[in-house]
Image: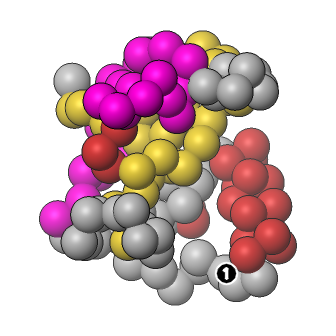
Amino acid sequence: MADELDDRSRADRRAIEAIIGRSFEDDEWPTDAMPSGTRVRVVQDDDWAGPWAEVFLGTVDATVPPQVVRNPKARPGELEYSVAFDHPQLDASGDGPYRKAVIWARYLENI
């Protein structure tokens, strides 16, 4: 999967790996996950105006292979995806702009 990464995504991956303290090199792409290259709409949560300031488009990318969300608020088996945004975005707190992020599947609609 790392062979599919461009130089910028490779650098992004190295930075994320340094933060979390492990490599994604041997992680496999889950068979039931959206493939890299899938066009998505990033949507807001039904219960609050977040986690992003607005609804926007992006593409699932291979910077980080989909992972099961490890959070008590996650749905069982919910995956998170690396998504490259069509245009830089602000989060619901006004921070950013971000050009990509790891986003829970519940905030992604396949388009």
Is residue 34 found inside the magenta-colored segment of the image? yes
Bounds of the magenta segment? 32-58
Q: Position of residue 90 (x, y in %)?
A: 67, 21
**Residue at (25% x, 51% y) in the render:** 34
Between 61 and 103, the residue placed more toward the observer is 103
Whether 51 is drawn above or below 20: the answer is above
Tell me where residue 39 appears, x and y as whole percent.
32, 29
Q: Is residue 58 visible?
A: no
62 relative to 45, above or below: below
Horizontal relation, residue 79 to residue 13: left or right:
left
Residue 63 versus residue 52 in the image, above or below: below
Q: Quadrant of residue 11?
A: bottom right
Q: Quadrant of residue 91?
A: top right
Does any portion of residue 10 appear in the rendered image?
yes
Asked whether residue 104 is drawn in magenta, I would say no
* Main secondary structure of the magenta stretch: loop
Residue underneath mark 1: 23
